[in-house]
Amino acid sequence: MKEFVECMAKSLRESSVERSAERCAGLLPRDTLIAIAGEKNLERGDPLPLLEAFMGGVDLRLLTPEVAEKIAGYVGERIKGLEGRRREAALLAGYMAREAADRLRAGLTMPSPPLPRMVARPLDVAALTGFLWPLFLEIEATPSLEETVEEIIKDASKGRVVGVGRRGHGATALLYAVLSKAYEEGWRIVFGLPAKWMRGSRTLVVSRGAVDDSFGVPTLVEGGGVHVFDEDYLRSFAESILGFDGVDYSEGGVESLVGRSGGSPVYLESASLLARILGERVDEEFVRRLPSGVEEIVEEAAARLGVRNLPGARVFPEGAVERGLEARLVEAGVLLRDGERGLLAYRNSVWTRLAAAPLGPRVVPGSKNVWWAAAVASLNGYGREAAYYALESLLEGGLEALDAVAAVHPEALYALLYSFTSYRIEVIAERAGGAGLQSAAAELYGLARRILEGLPPEAYGERSASLAIKEAYSETRRGFPERAAVVLEEALKLARTRETRGAALAELAAALASTGRIEEARSVAEESIGEAGGKPEPWAGKAYAVLGAIAENEDPGEAVENYKRALDVLAQLVYTGRCEYAEDMFTVASRLKKLRGRGDPRVCGGLAKCGLFDLYTIYGC
């Protein structure tokens, strides 16, 4: 396909559309040609289907404004004699050609990418930072540590940027303790960087370095700070790690080791590893012979094992190390294995200083768990390559990798895709959203929307608003309703039709309800219903469902009435062939069934009509 697209782009500069299609069609296999054009069109030599395929896959940097306008003009003439699906396909090709011409005239520049972010659990952050000890050790927190954790969370609740420990003195371990406590208390944890729209929310943003705190977002930063572990905790940690490593020890040995560590848990676990490798008992004599620095201990352990040239990343997917060596290093205790995610991690970050081999981006599509492989590759500086291979392997599960790259390295997606049409980007976003991969969907819809921002709103505003609604839906689904609300406010400024305005208002009501802005959500939902004018419009069904969800905790009777109204709308849509709303109908009907204690026969009929027999069974039909 790539050769065909490049051939068409070059030929169209010099020749007619018909001549270019005839010249380049031979670069496609016959079965591909039949799939694109159909046998009848192929026999007639109709170039329009090939032109549509070309516009769907062309990098706009291969075109000139004149070529794009030539295509738009040709399609405009051909549309006059077309009907049905053929007309719709031609209209789309014409739209893409006009967008290409307008963007090329305006200057084809990449929009500024958003900040990376992902909603995470404490164990997710542990894996992404390479700190896998919580999977292997449970260390009882001391009163002093609990006080420290409470102090940090208290500071964060005031909107301060908080450092959690001196580097090399267990900063990541303390970070995990803080996140675990905050998670128990209902805080949301975001791995990434802060953004303005998160102001005031109960959110902890975990960053790997210094961050701009001008937004007043509660933020935890690994490194810096003044909080350290006390001796009771260090003693407990030392005994736990020695037990994990199967190392014998004396009480005096542990006391000496804690004293020599200078308050650093990393020193304790490095000493334990060396004792394991040497097969020695940790007593006072062993501690006296230990080097004073963690680096020297790790270097001695590496020399004893005879290992060098390991992946230069703190955490990486299984299989990144030669299989026999990987097994030996896991057995020796140098590498920790997180079997659930298919990850390996060094005991501590000092080991990465001995490593020389880069971690290649091809680990993404070939990994046991492509989500984590892509996340790891992105965090270790391979974001763009990871995104490229994720896109390359789209049909082989690359969408999962794309989701991770979108969350932790959205710039990579922007760099790869900004020069394609907004429609092509939207198609990929729809595939991602349909697979439940909302980070990729949100960022791709956002990119498609933002590349239209510099174009005339009278021509592109309505489409931009439509993309914003889809983006907001995915943002809410991925755990960022605050962002969704901001995007929808922008959509409402551009919406020109009743349909777009009503849909934007319904989605905004859902986002506001998710952020706890209940009165605003109720008002916006009612405004959305008003846009429907009493007709069974899809957005009215959603707005009624939002009102039902709001009322569940306040007035169950009102919730039932609103869910019934939502079901009336959605069932009517489904029974008139709008099967895209069948799952929404099922969701609303399930809530209503739980509240009323009985089902609705319209739901069973609608689900059967649309072939959703798994939901048919779940509903109890």
Image (tube, grey):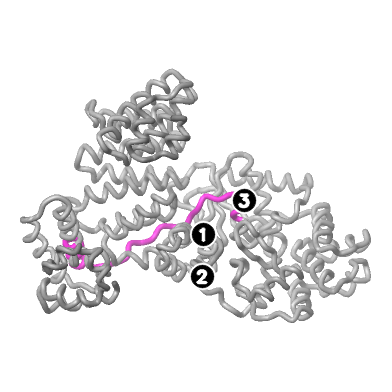
Residue found at x 27% / y 73%:
29
Q: Is residue 273 left or right of residue 148?
A: right
- How far separated are the C-alphas under marks 1 and 2? 16 Å
Residue 102, magenta (yes or no): yes
Which residues make up the magenta segment? 97-125
Q: Earlier in the sequence, mark 3 or mark 2?
A: 3
Dot label at residue 407: none
Dot label at residue 122: 3
Give how far across and how far down residue 190 sits, in percent: 53, 51
Task: Provide the secondary structure element on which disc 1 rests.
Answer: helix
- How far separated are the C-alphas under marks 3 and 2? 23 Å
Look at label 3 and name its amino acid: Pro
Find disc 1 in the rendering and name its residue: 371
Which quadrant of the structure image shows residue 451?
Answer: bottom left
Dot label at residue 381: 2
Binning the other alpha carbons within 10 Å of mark 2 as few (below 14), some (14 to 19) or many (20 upward) gives: some
Look at label 2 and name its amino acid: Gly
Q: Is residue 353 above or below residue 146?
A: below
Look at label 1 and name its amino acid: Trp
Q: Is residue 577 above or below residue 50?
A: above
In the picture, which quadrant includes the C terminus? top left
Q: Is residue 446 left or right of residue 323?
A: left
Q: Earlier in the sequence, mark 1 or mark 2?
A: 1
Q: Are marks 1 and 2 in contact (CB under 8 Å)?
A: no
Residue 254, magenta (yes or no): no
In the picture, which quadrant includes the N terminus? bottom left
Task: Provide the secondary structure element on which disc 3 rests.
Answer: helix
